Amino acid sequence: MFTSKIQTIGLLVDESKFQHSKELIKELTLNGINAEDIKIVVYRDKFKEKTAYSRPTFGKKDISWNGNVTVDFLNEFIKTEFDLLISYYDIEKAILMLITSKSEAKFKVGFASVDKRLNRWMIETATENYKLFVFELFKYLKSLK
């Protein structure tokens, strides 16, 4: 079965508006993915000064004017051949789309509201509906046997 081949997941999340990354990861683990096999990077439009973020977090300052990534954790994320990349953002932002397009993941999933050329499969829902997103994702993966 195809889902048994999904062991590593890269999770690219726009936390500018979506605040449920922990719950999203929990939903993925409830579907048989080991938490330690999920690598997450988080994008934020704005940073709070003197705030330590619990997840690797990046912003506009971490991408040079010519599209080069200037932080190591993000370059490492891009170069990792995840079985699945989940681009968890539903508003097109150049930086997020750049990371998705550069990612060396084997299979990419995202939202239907984002450029169709970036992902192999798109899910039609809003980011707040993370349970529905994960349900639809695994329903689709199981049908790919």
Image (cartoon, rainbow, N blue to C red):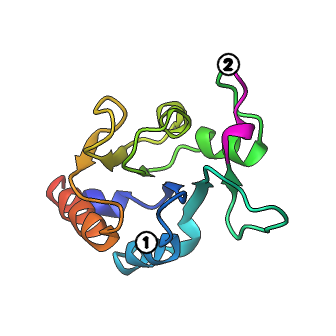
Q: Amino acid type of disc 2?
A: Asn
142 lies left or right of 96? left
Q: Which residue is mark 2?
A: 66
Q: Is residue 61 magenta?
A: yes
Residue picked out by circle 1 = 24
Is residue 15 inside the magenta stretch?
no
Prevalent SS, magenta region:
loop
**Amino acid marked by disc 1:** Leu
10 Å crowding of disc 2: few (<14), some (14-19), many (20+): few
Residue found at x 29% / y 59%: 126
Depth order, front residue of 145/30? 30
Picture quarter with the C terminus: bottom left
Circle 2 SS class: loop
Q: Label 1, label 2: how many angstroms apart (C-alpha)?
A: 32 Å
Q: Position of residue 19 (x, y in %)?
A: 50, 70
Instruction: Name the mark nearer the viewer: 1 or 2.
Output: 2
- Residue 58's place in the image compared with 31, above or below, is above
Q: Secondary structure at mark 1?
A: helix
The percent position of residue 74, horizontal first and vertical second, equals: 68, 44
Of residues 106 and 117, the one nearer the viewer is 117
Task: Report the magenta residues as a range.
Answer: 59-66
Q: Is residue 43 left or right of residue 129?
A: right
Assess whether mark 2 and mark 1 are in contact (beta carbons under 8 angstroms). no
Residue at left offset 37%, top offset 80%: 30
Residue 42, percent across and down? 60, 56
